[in-house]
Amino acid sequence: MLLVGYLSKAAALGFSAGVMPGPFQAYLIAQAARHGWRRAAVVALAPLITDGPIVLVVVFLLSRLPYWSMDLLRLVGGLFVLYLAWGIWRAFRSELAGEAHVLAAPGSEVSFLRAATINFLSPVVYIYWGTVSGPLFLEGWTRTPLLGGAFLLCFYSALIGISQVLIALVSGVRKWNPGITRWMLGLSALMMTVLAGTQVWAGVSALAQALVA
């Protein structure tokens, strides 16, 4: 029963990470709305690539980094998300103007790289692993690496699974009513702009206070 409870926690954390609103989820919605399920499903796998280095940083290096490092990461990540949001805004405007093919759509490799960069530069992921998921993972790992591996398997199965459900829902709506694509693009761009703006503001404010202090 202890094993079941431990792995249930891993699955619950993965589920909550997948449904938590953020730039990565907004980018997935934009990809599903514009390109359909097939490309977005690949993009959703980005955390499997980026989270490995993040876990290592959190477990071994985060406590040794300067206290302002997370604020700098927040600022850089926010600026990158703003850059991507601008591209989605342009796609939204071209859809409204009936110029759906004016903007060249990035290839799946580019979309995957952008999604991975969003995830890697998101301070939320570091905080999540540093405060909740990381300690639980280490608890299992110290008992046996097999248990730690089972934790990661349950966590990412839930995370990727809920992401795929989100993509399937958006893609289904896209097929049912193609005209709704532009509004999903607009919603995604708005979400990314607001989230990125909040992130940039928080990073700039914290860094400014650190310089004054």
Image (cartoon, rainbow, N blue to C red):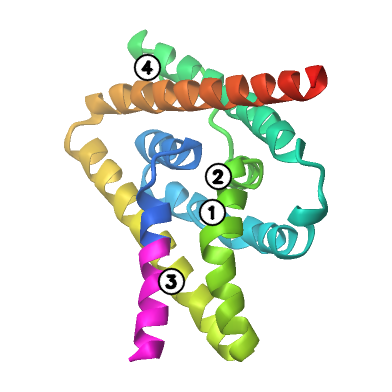
Q: Position of residue 172 (x, y in %)?
A: 23, 45
Q: Nearer the viewer, residue 102 or 54?
A: 54
Corner quadrant of residue 142: bottom right
Secondary structure found at label 3: helix
Label at residue 124: 2
Q: Earlier in the sequence, mark 4 or mark 1?
A: 4
Tag nearer the camera, 4 or 1 = 1
* Amino acid type at image mark 2: Val
Horizontally, residue 178 falls left or right of residue 132, namely left
Provide the residue designation for mark 4: 95
Secondary structure found at label 1: helix
Secondary structure found at label 2: helix
Corner quadrant of residue 82: top right
Horizontally, residue 69 falls left or right of residue 9, namely right
Q: Position of residue 62 (x, y in %)?
A: 74, 54
| Circles 2, 1 touching at the beta carbon (< 8 Å) | yes
Report the magenta residues as a range: 1-13
Q: How much space separates mark 4 and mark 1, taking CA atoms?
A: 36 Å
Task: Identify whether 195 is placed above or below 162.
Answer: above
Tag nearer the camera, 4 or 2 = 2
Disc 3: CA contacts within 10 A as few (<14), some (14-19) or many (>=20): many
Secondary structure found at label 4: helix
Q: Residue at x 70, y 36 (%)?
A: 73
* Amino acid type at image mark 3: Ala
Quarter that holds the C terminus: top right
